[in-house]
Image (cartoon, helix red, strand yellow):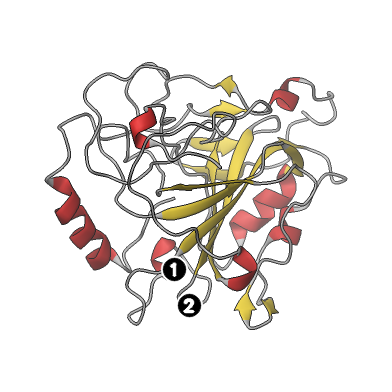
Amino acid sequence: MKFGIKGQIVVALALAVASASVVAGEGHGHSKGHDSMSGEACVGFGPQTPRDIDSLGGENKRMFTMAPPSTKMNLCNIHFHENAEHKAKDFSIYAGDGNHGYDSGYQCGISKELSKAELAPTKAAICKGEHGDLQPGDTIEVHWVHSSADVKPGPTLGSCLDDATMNPALRVETQVFTLVNDSNALDFNDLDYDGNMVNGYHQPKALPTNTGKPVEFLGSTTGPKYSEQQCSPLQVAWSVRPQCAKLDINSVGEWCKDNAFDEDHAHGVRKLVTNPKLLSKIK
């Protein structure tokens, strides 16, 4: 979850204030050892993300108000990461240390239980980017980002800001998927935005409803540029569903070809945050 060109002034100001509290570290979210806490943690920042949502503890003292329900906010961006940034019982298979946020994160347990048909190769490359394409059996984590600002959906998280609301409340609805070559699985286009308005708010056509009660907590933006040594200063309320679901990989490929967010490939992941001083308490 990372901001684009629009809104960089706001982010730059926040970073300038926060930088004085940062203890020098790697700052790219790809240090070796997924459970290591090498180097000193950044100081003075609010709670960070991603986290193990099965671990409820946290010692971060900088609290802020939980964002409203996503139904009372405007959808402003949809994007996804290759492998799960978060960790839970159902997505806890470690993918490796990776490289600049790729080939890291966590995979769904059900990805190891798929049929030969579900794992059949696709006819064409799916969402191919600089770091390769998606394959059946891969895990992705999808973020539906919502803002309290009077905005409409668009490219990058800069679409979540406007000139009249320089510090909007942000909420990210989150679902982890296993990709399968099966048209009977969930269709990503059914979870997309298509000009859908509900009670005056921009909304996705649907969100997953059968993957467990979302775990809510206070955190930050994610993405591989951040780590436990270089924290994000931005405040985000998270709703992370604890169970994986199967998603038709071909529908993801179609979405990558044409969507309102100019998304055409998977983003890298931020290394899991484990230092309790950088985590909020899940209530």
Query: Residue 3: horizontal and vertical position, in percent?
Result: 36, 58
Mark 2 and mark 1 residues within 8 Å of each other at the beta carbon: yes
Q: Quadrant of residue 269?
A: top left
Pick the residue in front: 46 or 249: 46
Residue reaching furthest to the left: 20
Q: Distance between the residues labelled 2 and 1?
A: 6 Å
Residue at 56% across / 38% down in the picture?
A: 133
| Amino acid type indicated by mark 2 | Val
Vertical placement of 270 versus 220: above or below? above
Query: Residue 230: horizontal and vertical position, in percent?
Result: 25, 38
- For mark 2, give the secondary structure: loop
Residue at 71% across / 43% down in the picture?
A: 249
Residue at 72% across / 67% down in the picture?
A: 205
Vertical placement of 17 versus 279: above or below? below
Residue reaching furthest to the right: 184
Q: Mark 1 points at which residue?
A: 160
Horizontal side of 39 relative to 210 (left or right) equals left
Vertical placement of 261 versus 99: above or below? below
Q: In which quarter of the image is the C terminus?
A: top right
Residue at 64% across / 32% down in the picture?
A: 138
Q: Mark 2 points at which residue?
A: 151
| Amino acid type indicated by mark 1 | Cys
- For mark 1, give the secondary structure: helix
Vertical placement of 222 versus 154: above or below? above
Badge 2 crowding class, 10 Å Cα cut-off, few under 14, some 14 to 19, many 20 or more, is some
Pick the residue in front: 253 or 148: 148
The first of marks 2 and 1 along the sequence is 2
Q: In which quarter of the image is residue 181?
A: top right
Query: Residue 161: horizontal and vertical position, in percent?
Result: 39, 71
Horizontal side of 272 relative to 239 (left or right) equals left
Pick the residue in front: 99 or 120: 99
Horizontal side of 66 relative to 207 (left or right) equals left
